[in-house]
């Protein structure tokens, strides 16, 4: 058999098992190959949260996990964020309805920067003042919440719908939403120039 360098190099690679963080019971997220352990540091895995948690109700979100440490052939990760699939939001968008989005950065109790991206859909177009009032509601809410909770705590409360339900109660005072969700929630790199909401 002729020597195949590409095949020979592949055989030398080590397969590392990727594990979720402790908040997700360190379930297996998959495997990744590399020649050396340090080569897998920094790699990211995106996976449907229903598979991570074994909870079908969380299928609308995917989790982003970053490998931060290797022990033997186990690659340990940290949660970088969650993102709702865009198709979930788009099915609510129809002519005559209003879609309000926002993007802002807060600090959690550990002084980490967190990007928050809510989305709201109503059955008619809202006045500008109503949109501003609604944005102020969720911005103020997350600023205060970040003073008390860690990034991971807030992620869990988004996934179990505690945060969205609390916000919907406040938003209804301005206008009842057809659909409301935190479409993206993730750690913001500190090296980026950002406008912090405090």
Image (cartoon, grey):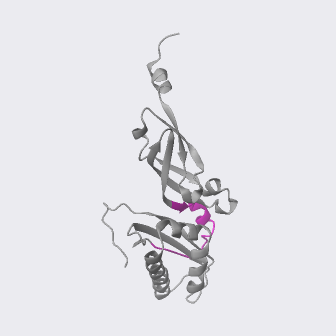
Q: Which residues are magenta?
A: 82-102
Residue at 50% x, 53% y is: 65
Residue 8 makes an appearance in the image: yes
How many numbered discs? 0
Toward the front, the furthest residue is 72
| Front one among 170 and 86 | 170
Q: State the quadrant of the C terminus.
A: bottom left
* Image side of residue 73 versus residue 179, left or right: left
Residue 173 vertical placement versus 82 (above, below): below
Question: Up-down: is 115 above or below 70?
Answer: below
Q: Residue furthest top?
A: 1
In the picture, measured across the screen, residue 131 lies left or right of residue 88, that is left
Q: Is residue 96 visible?
A: no
Which residue is nearer to you in this view: 154 or 3?
Answer: 154
In percent of width and height, residue 99 lies at 54, 74
Magenta highlight on residue 90: yes
Q: Is residue 79 above or below residue 92?
A: above
Q: Left or right: 138 with respect to 176? A: left
91 vs 115, left or right, is right
Question: In x, y percent, where is residue 172?
Answer: 59, 86
Where does residue 163 sit, x and y in percent of width and height?
Answer: 57, 75
- The percent position of residue 193, horizontal first and vertical second, equals 30, 65
Q: Nearer the viewer, residue 94 or 161?
A: 161
Magenta includes 98? yes
Query: Would you place residue 170 above or below residue 10 in this image?
Result: below
- Residue at point 46% right, 73% down? 102
**Residue drawn at the location 55% of the way across and 75% of the way down:** 120
């Amino acid at each position: 058999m002729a020597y195949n360098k590409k095949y020979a190099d592949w055989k030398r690679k080590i397969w590392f098992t990727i594990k979720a963080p402790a908040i997700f019971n360190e379930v297996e997220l998959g495997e990744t190959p590399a020649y050396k352990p340090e080569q897998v540091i920094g790699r990211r895995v995106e996976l449907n949260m229903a598979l991570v948690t074994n909870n079908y109700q969380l299928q609308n979100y995917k989790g982003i996990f970053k490998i931060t440490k290797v022990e033997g052939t186990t690659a340990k990760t940290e949660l970088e964020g969650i993102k709702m699939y865009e198709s979930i939001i788009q099915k609510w968008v129809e002519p005559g309805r209003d879609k309000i989005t926002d993007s802002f950065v807060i600090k959690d109790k550990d002084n980490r920067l967190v990007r928050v991206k809510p989305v709201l859909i109503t059955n008619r177009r809202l006045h500008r003042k109503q949109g501003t009032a609604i944005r102020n509601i969720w911005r103020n809410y997350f600023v205060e919440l970040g003073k008390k909770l860690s990034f991971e705590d807030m992620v869990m409360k988004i996934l179990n719908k505690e945060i969205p339900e609390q916000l919907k109660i406040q938003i209804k005072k301005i206008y009842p939403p057809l659909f409301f969700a935190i479409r993206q929630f993730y750690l913001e790199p500190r090296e980026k120039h950002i406008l912090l909401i405090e």
